[in-house]
């Protein structure tokens, strides 16, 4: 066991329940199987395939927004689609996170001149991590998720620190 290596054999470790929940959450981020355009096929599906094996990070896709922690917006968001993206986001349980994948989701990408294209999905929902590229490599998607895990860890740390300061 890793804890034996850190604290010695037959040791006890104390952890706050919130830290335990945080650990469980960030090591099993489930994302919605939802793709809008080429990024979903070229980067996202590839990242989940056997070569890059997203599963080893505890990252799986689910078919319902009610069972997901993360929405990956992979593709060009047009005005018609923006309404659907917002509705799916609203149906996700808290705490929820959003990853903007690819130039289109980050800032409109190669289609930003078109009047029906949203200049980045952060115009409609809050974004936690941006992954640039057209399309981003599967490794970039995985790196983006590692950054998201770090962000979740930091948020929990800050919350606990603020609580003990106020106690
Ligand atoms: S960023 Fe490039 S690959 Fe991704 S959806 Fe836009 S055009 Fe397609």
Image: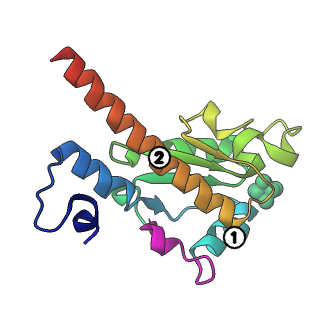
Write the start and end of the magenta stretch as one range: 49-61
Q: Taking 9 as reference, is 123 above or below it?
A: above
Furthest residue toward bottom: 50
Categorize mark 1 by other alpha carbons within 10 Å: few (<14), some (14-19), many (20+): some
The reply to whether callout 2 and callout 1 are in contact (CB within 8 Å) is no
- Residue 30 in view here: yes
Q: Nearer the viewer, residue 111 or 158?
A: 158
Q: Quadrant of residue 62?
A: bottom left
Q: Badge 1 is on which residue? A: 41
Of the 4 image quadrants, the one containing the N terminus is bottom left
Of the 4 image quadrants, the one containing the C terminus is top left
**Is 57 left, or right, of 114 in this rendering?**
left
Categorize mark 2 by other alpha carbons within 10 Å: few (<14), some (14-19), many (20+): few
Q: CA distance from mark 2 to mark 1?
A: 26 Å
Q: Residue 128, how many percent across, how many down?
A: 54, 40
Q: Is residue 160 magenta?
A: no
Q: Taking 101 as reference, is 125 above or below it?
A: above
Q: Nearer the viewer, residue 52 or 11?
A: 11
Ligand 1 lies in quarter: bottom right
Q: Which mark, by number, is residue 150?
A: 2
Secondary structure under tag 1 reads helix
Q: Earlier in the sequence, mark 2 or mark 1?
A: 1
Which residue is painted at 63% across and 66% down in the image?
44
Q: Quadrant of residue 46?
A: bottom right
Q: Residue 111, how many percent across, how many down?
A: 85, 46
Which residue is painted at 53% across and 55% down in the image?
146
Q: Is residue 53 magenta?
A: yes
Q: Nearer the viewer, residue 74 or 14?
A: 14
Q: Nearer the viewer, residue 117 or 6?
A: 6
**Is 146 left, or right, of 165 in this rendering?**
right
Furthest residue toward front: 8
């Amino acid at each position: 066991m890793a804890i034996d290596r850190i604290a010695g054999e037959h040791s006890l470790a104390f952890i706050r329940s919130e830290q335990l929940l945080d650990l469980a959450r960030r090591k099993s981020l489930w994302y919605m199987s939802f793709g809008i355009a080429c990024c979903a096929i070229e980067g996202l599906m590839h990242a989940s395939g056997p070569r890059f094996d997203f599963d080893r990070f505890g990252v799986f896709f689910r078919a319902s927004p009610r069972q997901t922690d993360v929405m990956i917006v992979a593709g060009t968001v047009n005005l018609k689609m923006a309404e659907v993206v917002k509705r799916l986001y609203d149906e996700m349980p808290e705490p929820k996170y959003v990853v903007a994948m690819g130039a289109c989701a980050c800032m409109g990408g190669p289609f930003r001149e078109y009047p029906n294209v949203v200049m980045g999905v952060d115009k409609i929902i809050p974004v936690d991590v941006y992954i640039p590229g057209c399309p981003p490599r599967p490794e970039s998607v995985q790196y983006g998720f590692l950054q998201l895990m770090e962000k979740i860890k930091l948020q929990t740390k800050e919350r606990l620190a603020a609580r003990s300061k106020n106690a």
